[in-house]
Amino acid sequence: MYCPDIYFPTAFTPNNDLLNDGFGPWGGLSMLSNYRLSIFGRWGELVFTSTDPYKKWDGKYKGSRLPMGVYTWISSFRLRGADNFRKGTITILK
């Protein structure tokens, strides 16, 4: 489904069943530029960063699966000539 806006889900299940295994933006990703996504753990450590909107976070940090819980994310990007900043939380479900 094509969506001209950008949407970030609030939960995902990184259990390798090929359904909802990664976290990142959805929507009109081809229209994004200057993209950056950063995800932080409970104590503020950076657990994931990407400048590629198609690369999703797999729920791992340094090669190990992180526990179920809530993680904080921030993202900045340019869409339709406007700078955007979004932030929120993502919940890992098992």
Image (cartoon, rainbow, N blue to C red):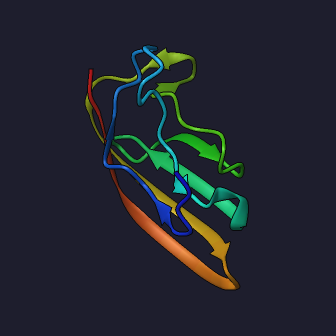
User: In the rendered view, does 37 fall on the left or right side of 33?
Assistant: left
Quadrant placement of the C terminus = top left
Residue 34 in view (yes/no): no
x, y percent for residue 20: 41, 31
Residue 36, placed above or below residue 61: below
Question: Looking at the image, which residue is at 46% across and 14% down?
Answer: 16
Seen in the picture, residue 28 relative to 94 is either above or below; the reply is: below
Total numbered labels placed on residues in the image:
0
**Residue at the farthest bottom position:** 82
Q: Nearer the viewer, residue 27 or 87?
A: 27
Would you say 29 lies left or right of 69 here? right
Provide residue 2's location: percent of width, then percent of height.
Answer: 56, 57
- The residue shown at (65%, 57%) is 29
Q: Is residue 8 above or below residue 48?
A: below
Q: Residue at x 42, y 14 (%)?
A: 17
The quarter of the picture where residue 69 lies is: top left
Can residue 15 be seen in this snapshot?
A: yes
- Counting from the top left corner in percent of width and height, residue 49 is at 61, 45
Expressed as whole percent of the image width and height from the top left, the position of residue 12 reads 35, 34
Q: Tell me which residue sits at (57%, 38%) in the image.
A: 56
Is 17 situated left or right of 82 in this image? left
Image height of 69 relative to 3, above or below: above
Front position in the image: 27 or 61? 27
